[in-house]
Amino acid sequence: MSEELQTIIDLIRYGASRFNAAGLTFGHSYDNALDEATQLTLHALHLPHDLSPVYGNARVTEAEKEDVLGLFLRRIEERIPAAYLTGEAWFAGLSFKSDPRALVPRSPIAEMIEAGFQPWLGDREVRRALDLCTGSGCIAIAMAHYNPEWHVDGVDISEDALALSGENERRLQVENVRFLKSDLFSGLTGEHYDLIVTNPPYVTNDETDALPREYSHEPELGLRAGDDGLDLALRIMRDAPLHLDRDGLLVCEVGEAERALVKLLPELPLAWVEFKVGQMGIFVAECADLLAHHAHIARLADAREARRQPPGDLF
């Protein structure tokens, strides 16, 4: 069989067929077998990810073929996301280091960053921006890269994630970003921002337990968020006004938990972002609206925090 695979395109086609036959799950940077097979093949051959199709018929050596097939086998047998196998993920047109210390970068917020957060920002001036739950640092670094006049903070509770975000900061040579350890806003006393962007954990307990094997390689800390996926989002909505300027904005991703949030807070005016492929569970909220509905949001968030505390911590 190996002798029948002679060219780059042969390997890509073979990999895609094997991936589909194995029933792999796609959702980490790439959403289909052909794209994953392409990126794994090009990575193993030390070729650029955007290699021109004219090289598709280039022949490969036996040693190169073994390298490619070895990556295919690991993807199938170990169910490791392609980004972890290559050590690279693309986000907002930038190349980030990716490994199991943080989720694979894949948020649709990339599209908002590249669009300058328009039309939501309008003519607001942004001097300071915050990326809450920064993970690999992709959102913070992309904001800093495309807006060199901004000062951007990225915070996370995970030291492993912060180490990775620091490596990505150096990789992309951005100088207007800093990373801090904080459990949401707890370490940001006195800090204020014009824009807060966050992609917090929002997967429900049941969904987390049922996720395909590919997701087991990612830190559960970045996924699980209670029975309806809103445990962290509600805390963020409660506390964000303390750190937003008066006309500041909160951009928050809640994914499939969108329906649960609308049901809990039907009176709260949230702008649900329409992306090129439709709605993706990301809303934009005005600081003034969060303040106007703060009492209700706080009751919901406080009740969840109380349930999470051990009995000995209640008194």
Image (tube, rainbow, N blue to C red):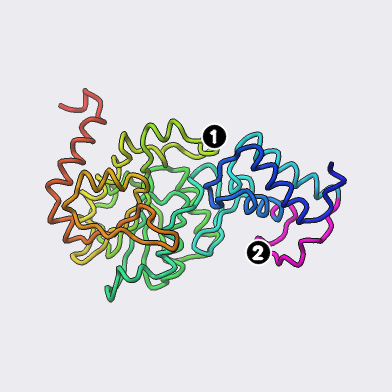
Q: Earlier in the sequence, mark 2 or mark 1?
A: 2
- Quadrant of res 110: bottom left
Q: Is residue 173 visible?
A: yes
Q: Is residue 140 visible?
A: no
Main SS of residues in magenta: loop
Quadrant (top left/top right/bottom left/bottom right) for the N terminus: top right
Position above or below: 113 against 182: below
Does 153 lie within the magenta span? no
- Name the secondary structure under disc 1: helix
Q: Is residue 215 left or right of residue 257?
A: right
Q: CA distance from mark 2 to mark 1?
A: 28 Å
The disc label shown at residue 213, or none: 1
Quadrant (top left/top right/bottom left/bottom right) for the C terminus: top left
Where is residue 81? Give x, y as percent.
Answer: 58, 43
The span shown in magenta is 43-61
Residue drawn at x 18%, y 27% as measured from the top left: 314
Residue drawn at x 29%, y 46% as measured from the top left: 259
Position above or below: 22 against 266: above
